[in-house]
C-alpha cells in the first residue's frame, strides 16, 4: 500500500503485511489503511519545521543553549527533514540521517564537486591584491582564493547526539500535544556517547605556566593560580565579585557565570543552576588579599571608593566590568604557545580534578568543588582513568596502618 515518498532517499514508501489467513489479511489491510489515514489528518500534516518553531517557543533552557539548538536546526535539521510531516518521520529516517552526518556534514552523495565560496555568478579563482597600483603579486604576497573541491568532514558523535536531542525534544512535545501517537526518536539509535579524553597539563607544565603568568603581571598570575586550585569554569571566574570572596573564613562562593550572547555580555546561573562554596587554602587567601589590596589602591588613586560589588578580575580600571571570557582564553593560549605547551584554559579544570583524585580525595568532594551534578557520577565518568592511582594510595594507606607482620610464614 503506497504511503508517500521517503524524504531522505526520495523513494516511494509502501506499507506491507503478509499472512495466509484470509480473515487476518483483512485485519492487516484495515490497520494499514488506518495508518495511512492518520498521515492525512490535519494534525499529522504538521511539518518538522512547524514543530521545531513550536518547541523553541515553549522549551525552557539557557539562552546560549537555545542559540546552539537553533543553529543545529538551521544548518542540519531543517534542510534535511524540515518539510517532512512529523507523522511520516520514522526511526529508520533518523538513523539514516545520523549515519549520513557521521560520513559528511553536508550529506553529500559521495561524488566529487566544487564547494563554491559565494552564491550566484563569480570567479572561481580570485586574487586579493594588497596594493591598488601596479605591483608584483608574488613579491608583495597577494592572496589567491579559489573554490576548492569538496572534502567530506563528518560531524562528531557528540554533535550528532545533540542534534538527536533537538529532534527528540521536538517530537516528544508533538506527542504530548497529540500531533503524533508516539515519538519515533525515542527508539532511534543514536551514536554512542564518546568517552571523555581529558588532557590536563603535567605538574611540570603547570609550574611553567604559572611562572610565566606571574611574569606577565600579578593580576594575571592570581587568575591562573585560582583556576588551578579551584577548577572553576571560565564563565564562573569572570563573574566572580568581591562579595563572593570571604577571605576571613577562606571560602569562595560560585553563584553565577558570565557569557556573551549576540555580542552582549550577560550574567546567568551556573551550569548546574546551583551555588557552591569552595574552601581556599592559606596561600590562596594571601594571594587574593594582596590582589584585593592592589585593586583598592588603584581605584582610590582614581578618586573612586572601592566597591565590594566590583569584579575580582577585570580589564577596566575600576573593575566595574568583567573580563571577556574569550579574551581570557586567547591570552592564556598565546602564553602557553610561547612556552611550547599545547593546551587550553579548560585544561586547568582538568588539572585541578586529576591532581585531587590522584592525591586520594574522594570523588564526591572533587565533584562538589568542580560543580558537577549527579553526586560524582559525571566526575567519575570523565576522570575514571585517574581513579586507579587514588585506589593504590588508599591500599597503601590501609596497609601502613595495619603494620607488616614480622613472620610471613615463610618455609
Image: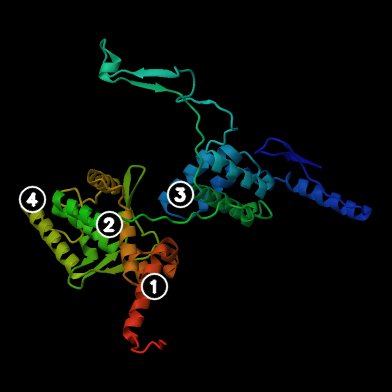
Separation of marks 4 and 1 at Cα, in angstroms = 54 Å
Q: In which quarter of the image is the N terminus?
A: top right
Q: Can residue 362 be seen in this view?
A: no
Name the foreground residue: 405 vs 168.
405
For the residue labelled by badge 2, is the local secondary structure a helix, a strand or a loop? Answer: helix
Q: Residues within 10 Å of mark 2 (few under 14, many from 20)?
A: many
* Residue 268 visible in the snapshot: yes
**Alpha carbons under labels 2 and 3: distance apart:** 23 Å
In three-dimensional space, the C-alpha distance between marks 3 and 4, rounded to whole angstroms, equals 41 Å
Q: Distance between the residues labelled 3 and 1?
A: 41 Å
Please report the residue visible at 32 percent of the width from the left and 84 percent of the height from the top.
401
Front residue of this view, candidates 39 and 254? 254
Relative side of 370 to 35, left or right: left
Q: What element carries label 3?
A: helix
How far apart marks 2 and 4 lie (CA) works out to: 25 Å
Badge 3: few (under 14), some or many (20 or more) residues near its Cα, within 10 Å?
some
Disc on the earlier residue, 2 or 4: 2
- Residue located at (39% from left, 62% from top): 273
Q: What element carries label 4?
A: loop
The residue pinned by badge 1 equals 391
Question: In the image, residue 57 lies at what x, y percent?
Answer: 51, 49
Q: Which mark is residue 66?
A: 3
Label 2 or label 3, whichever comes before in sequence order = 3
Tag nearer the camera, 4 or 1: 1
- For label 2, the residue is 237
Q: Nearer the N terminus, badge 2 or badge 1?
A: 2
On screen, residue 367 above or below 332: below
Image point 56% across, 46% down: which residue?
Answer: 52
Amino acid at each position: 500500500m503506497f504511503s508517500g515518498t521517503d524524504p531522505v532517499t526520495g523513494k516511494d514508501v509502501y506499507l506491507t503485511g503478509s499472512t495466509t489467513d484470509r480473515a487476518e489479511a483483512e485485519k492487516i489491510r484495515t490497520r494499514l489503511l488506518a495508518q495511512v489515514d492518520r498521515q492525512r489528518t490535519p494534525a499529522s500534516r504538521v511539518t518538522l519545521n512547524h514543530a521545531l518553531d513550536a518547541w523553541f517557543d515553549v522549551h525552557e533552557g539557557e539562552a546560549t543553549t537555545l542559540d546552539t539548538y537553533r543553529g543545529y536546526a538551521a544548518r542540519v535539521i531543517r534542510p534535511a527533514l524540515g518539510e517532512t510531516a512529523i507523522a511520516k518521520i520514522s526511526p529508520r529516517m533518523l538513523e539514516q540521517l545520523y549515519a549520513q552526518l557521521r560520513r559528511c556534514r553536508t550529506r553529500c552523495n559521495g561524488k566529487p564537486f566544487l564547494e563554491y565560496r559565494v552564491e550566484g555568478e563569480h570567479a572561481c579563482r580570485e586574487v586579493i591584491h594588497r596594493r591598488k597600483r601596479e605591483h608584483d603579486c608574488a613579491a608583495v604576497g597577494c592572496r589567491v582564493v579559489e573554490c576548492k573541491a569538496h572534502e567530506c568532514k563528518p560531524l562528531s558523535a557528540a554533535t550528532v547526539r545533540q542534534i538527536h536531542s533537538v529532534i527528540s525534544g521536538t517530537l516528544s512535545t508533538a506527542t504530548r500535544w497529540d500531533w503524533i501517537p508516539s515519538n519515533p526518536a525515542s527508539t532511534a539509535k543514536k551514536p554512542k556517547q564518546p568517552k571523555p579524553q581529558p588532557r590536563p597539563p603535567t605538574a611540570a607544565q603547570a609550574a611553567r605556566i604559572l611562572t610565566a603568568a606571574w611574569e606577565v603581571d600579578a593580576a594575571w598570575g592570581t587568575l591562573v593560580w585560582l583556576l588551578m586550585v579551584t577548577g572553576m569554569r571560565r564563565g564562573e571566574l569572570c563573574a566572580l565579585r568581591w562579595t563572593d570572596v570571604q577571605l576571613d573564613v577562606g571560602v569562595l562562593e560560585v553563584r553565577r557565570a558570565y557569557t556573551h550572547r549576540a555580542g552582549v555580555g550577560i550574567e546567568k546561573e551556573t551550569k548546574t543552576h546551583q551555588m557552591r562554596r569552595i574552601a581556599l587554602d592559606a596561600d590562596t587567601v594571601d594571594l587574593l588579599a594582596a590582589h584585593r589590596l592592589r585593586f583598592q589602591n588603584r581605584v582610590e588613586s582614581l578618586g573612586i571608593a572601592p566597591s565590594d560589588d566590583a569584579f575580582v578580575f577585570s580589564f577596566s580600571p575600576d573593575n566595574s566590568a568583567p573580563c571577556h571570557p574569550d579574551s581570557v582564553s586567547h591570552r592564556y593560549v598565546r602564553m602557553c604557545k610561547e612556552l611550547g605547551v599545547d593546551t587550553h584554559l579548560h585544561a586547568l579544570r582538568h588539572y585541578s580534578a586529576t591532581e585531587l583524585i590522584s592525591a586520594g580525595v574522594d570523588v564526591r568532594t572533587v565533584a562538589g568543588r568542580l560543580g558537577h551534578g549527579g553526586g560524582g557520577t559525571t566526575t567519575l565518568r570523565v576522570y575514571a582513568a585517574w581513579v586507579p592511582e587514588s585506589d593504590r594510595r588508599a591500599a597503601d594507606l590501609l596497609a601502613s596502618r595495619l603494620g607488616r607482620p614480622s613472620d610471613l610464614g615463610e618455609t
